[in-house]
Image (spheres, rainbow, N blue to C red):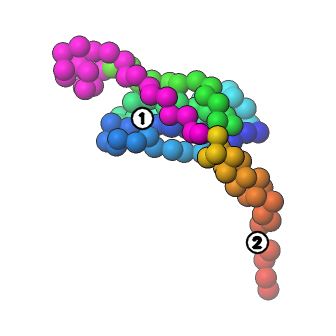
């Protein structure tokens, strides 16, 4: 089980869209990243990290409606390195550890 960080390059925004997911292993992270990438035509690529270390990137192939194709030369999108810094990752690990200690609310009569 791990907390994976997904950074989506989205054509609508100048900064990446950040998403945290908790999955059982890397294979599930790959499948989920591809599934999330396919949800929106605006997502150009996704970079997946574990504990701040980049694991892999998945890019969308350029299609006839892509910005590159409209400009005349179709190229696959280039994923920028969007790795979070060590201070942020330390804070994230602390928040995840704290979240794991929270007990679910108990039913009251």
Which residue corresponds to mark 2?
105
Residue 35 left/right relative to 30: left
Residue at 79% in and 86% down: 109
Tell which of 37 and 82 is nearer to you.
82
Sequence-earlier tag: 1 or 2: 1
Tell me if residue 32 can be seen: yes
1 and 2 marks in contact (CB < 8 Å)? no
Q: Position of residue 49 (x, y in %)?
A: 61, 33
Is residue 80 shown in magenta? yes
Rendered residue at 33%/36% (across/down): 11
> Farthest residue in the bottom direction?
109
Q: CA distance from mark 1 to mark 2?
A: 37 Å
**Which residue lies at the image location 25% right of the left edge and 26% below the top edge?**
67
Q: Is residue 50 above or below residue 20?
A: above
- Which of the labelled discs sits on residue 9, or is there none? 1
Q: Judge left or right: residue 108 versus residue 73.
A: right
Can residue 38 be seen here? The reply is: no
Q: Which residues are magenta?
A: 63-85
**Can you tell which mark lies on residue 103?**
none
**The N terminus lies in which quarter of the figure?**
top right
Dominant secondary structure, magenta: loop
In this rendering, the count of numbered labels is 2
């Amino acid at each position: 089980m791990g907390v994976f960080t997904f950074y989506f390059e989205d054509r609508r925004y100048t900064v990446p869209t950040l998403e945290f997911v908790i999955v059982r292993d890397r294979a599930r992270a790959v499948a989920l990243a591809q599934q999330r990438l396919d949800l929106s035509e605006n997502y150009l690529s996704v970079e997946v990290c574990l504990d701040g270390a980049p694991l892999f990137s998945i890019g969308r192939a350029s299609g006839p409606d892509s910005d590159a194709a409209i400009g005349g030369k179709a190229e696959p999108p280039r994923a920028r390195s969007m790795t979070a810094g060590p201070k942020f990752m330390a804070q994230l690990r602390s928040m995840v550890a704290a979240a794991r200690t929270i007990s679910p609310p108990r039913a009251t009569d």
